[in-house]
Amino acid sequence: MTQTAAYNNELTTMENEKNGKFLKGVLIGAVIGGALAMLDSNTRNKITSTTKNMKDSTMDMYSQVKNNPSEVKNDLQERMKSASSILKEAISDAQNLYEKVNENIVVPATLVKEESSDILSNAKEVISSDLKDIGGKVKEAGEEVIDGSNGQSNSSNKDASNPKNTAGTNN
């Protein structure tokens, strides 16, 4: 038991070390990638302008909350209510669409599939019985040909053995 526990602890420690090394590698790669991206002047300008915009909007929000906290609270509540009603409407529309698709596409497609399966099985039955009939007739015709040629060869054998019918004899 203690050997198993020690082995499991070693595995866990090795996994943690591997995960730690991986995480360090990811972080180092991100830092290097960020530093290389900063070498481009367009990227630096975008980051600078984005940072300034974020700072300005944060300062505006802070000043609004500081000066009129109840107004900001009411405004946020109204926005949340509006967003909630829009989401409810979207969910309702999605449910209606699902029902329409189910009624107009899925159900008819299922019916078509079932009907086509029935048609195929009926066609197979009809074709199978017709093929058996045709096969029986072909077999019968073949037997007629075989029996007819056996009859002719038997009659010609009989003719050859019958001295009256032998060609070249004078009776």
Image (cartoon, grey):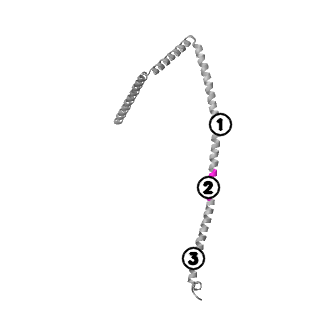
Residue 99: x percent and y percent?
64, 36
Residue 41: x percent and y percent?
45, 20
Mark 1 against mark 3, which lies toward the viewer? 3
Question: Label 3: how many residues lie within 10 Å, few (<14), some (14-19) or many (20+)?
Answer: few
Q: Nearer the viewer, residue 143 or 40?
A: 40
Which quadrant of the figure has residue 108? Answer: top right
Q: Is residue 97 magenta?
A: no
**Helix or strand or loop: what does disc 1 sit on?**
helix
Residue position marked by numbered label 1 in the rendering: 100
- Check whether the beta carbons of the residues at disc 1 and disc 3 lie within 8 A of each other: no
Residue located 63% across and 49% down the image: 116
Of the two numbered discs 3 and 2 on the same chain, state the one appearing first in sequence: 2
Amino acid on which disc 3 is placed: Ser
Marks 3 and 2, how far apart at CA = 42 Å
Horizontal side of residue 94 vs 8, given as left or right = right
Q: Which residues are magenta?
A: 118-128
Q: Nearer the viewer, residue 58 or 158?
A: 158
Marks 1 and 3, how far apart at CA = 77 Å
Q: Nearer the viewer, residue 36 or 109?
A: 36
Q: Nearer the viewer, residue 15 or 130?
A: 130
Amino acid on which disc 2 is placed: Lys
Quadrant that contains the C terminus: bottom right
Q: Is residue 126 magenta?
A: yes
Horizontal side of residue 160 vs 35, given as left or right = right
* Residue 161 tag number: none
Residue position marked by numbered label 3 in the rendering: 153
Amino acid on which disc 1 is placed: Lys
Residue 98 to residue 112: above or below: above
**Helix or strand or loop: what does disc 2 sit on?**
helix
Residue position marked by numbered label 2 in the rendering: 124
